[in-house]
Amino acid sequence: MARRRVKLSPLLASTRRLTAAAGKVVQRAVRKAVKQSVQQAVKQAGLQAHAPPRTGDWSMGLVFGPAGARRYWLYLPPGLRAGAPLPLLVMLHGCNQNAEGFAALTRMNRLAAKQGFAVLYPEQDRMANPQGCWNWYGTRSHLADAEVATLLLALDQVLHRHPLDGARVAVAGLSAGASMAALLAARAADRFVAVVMHSGVPPGSADSSLSALRAMFGRAAPDAPGAASVHWPPLLVLHGTADGVVSSNNGVAAAALWADALGARAAAERSVQRGQRRAMHITDYRVGRKVVVSLSLVAGMGHAWSGGTKTLPFSDPTGPDASALIWAFVRRQFPRSTGGLSAPVRAGTLSRSV
């Protein structure tokens, strides 16, 4: 018996067509999501291939503060021993980065294992910023203040739980991380012996996302935040002269802002080049004989970590080794009574290593 065809009403026919079209849209979205997931997995595998050496202690922590919950990663070099607290370097990643990727890019853990210092990598939450940027510019909304307070809580947490020296703590960052590092040091100057800005914007240059864009292009004059009487920690600035994302004018402005706050005077610019790496044009600012601000403009470098891992984004392997320059500057700022580092002794229980 032939199957009887049912004639659909115009409304029902239109509904079926819309449903079929919607189904195709969903299928395309699923295929796109699967493709992105595979690409992310491949990218993550690449990061793991360039992870720091598998020595020392690499562990994840969580802190709850005014800005909400934030993860962090802590690297402790091998050879920890009682009664010998280590210096600590806080490293703040840039936009579209995370803590593990930043560790792989900078290879700072490898240097820490050799030199005997710990490294703390706070990680921005994508719910707080979809691009993973630190909200250094959110002073009008007070989001920046909340993130500063949360980062300080993370610092207090690791200092309390591990054999680290609170008198030898420095902070460094790249891009948005550099801007947050400078704001952090300006707001809590007594907590850090040094601050390093790599390709960032000086504090006081913006108070909203719109003004942040103007500041990134070097079109904003920074205004020193906090009390003028506060003695800011020494500053190292690294910036590429061909940076098309954050103008190198910001590096110059940051050095001038810091030098003015510290009452420092500029020495004559000098050029330094090691081997085939890019040249640096260096201006030191001194108080007496002590260098309290150092500005290093890397010739021809764009928006990238100088001397970073070759195959990772935001890296210029032809630039000077930024990690080595940072540690050399930081170490010179340690109090003389605690400036020497104890030789590491192989000991301790390791958690997941990288």
Image (cartoon, grey):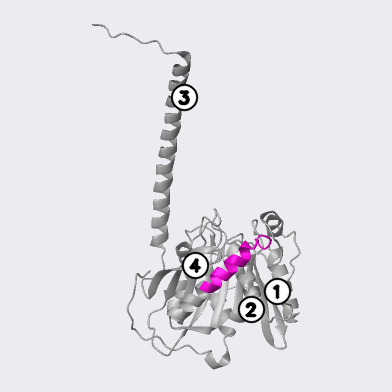
Tell me, for residue 18, which label it has, or none: 3
C-alpha gap between disc 1 and disc 3 = 59 Å
**Can you tell which quarter of the image residue 235 is in?**
bottom right
Q: Which residue is mark 2?
A: 189
User: Mark 4 and mark 1 in contact (Cβ < 8 Å)?
Assistant: no
N-term-proximal mark, 1 vs 4? 4
Amino acid type at image mark 3: Leu
In this view of the protein, can residue 118 be seen by the observer?
no
N-term-proximal mark, 2 vs 4? 4
N-term-proximal mark, 4 vs 3? 3
Please, what secondary structure does the residue beneath circle 1 have? Answer: loop
C-alpha gap between disc 1 and disc 2 = 10 Å
Amino acid type at image mark 1: Gly
> Horizontally, is 208 left or right of 113 in the view?
right
C-alpha gap between disc 3 and disc 2 = 61 Å
Please, what secondary structure does the residue beneath circle 4 have? Answer: strand
Q: Which residue is most to the top?
A: 1
Q: Nearer the viewer, mark 2 or mark 4?
A: 4
N-term-proximal mark, 1 vs 3? 3
Q: Residue at the spot x=32%, y=78% of the render?
A: 349
What is the span of residues highlighted in magenta in the rendered image? 137-153
User: Mark 2 and mark 1 in contact (Cβ < 8 Å)?
Assistant: yes
Amino acid type at image mark 2: Ala
Q: Residue at the spot x=67%, y=83% of the render?
A: 291
N-term-proximal mark, 3 vs 2? 3
Q: Badge 1 local density, few (<14 within 10 Å), some, or many (20+)? A: few
Tell me, for residue 226, which label it has, or none: 1
C-alpha gap between disc 1 and disc 4 = 25 Å
**Can you tell which quarter of the image residue 179 is in?**
bottom right
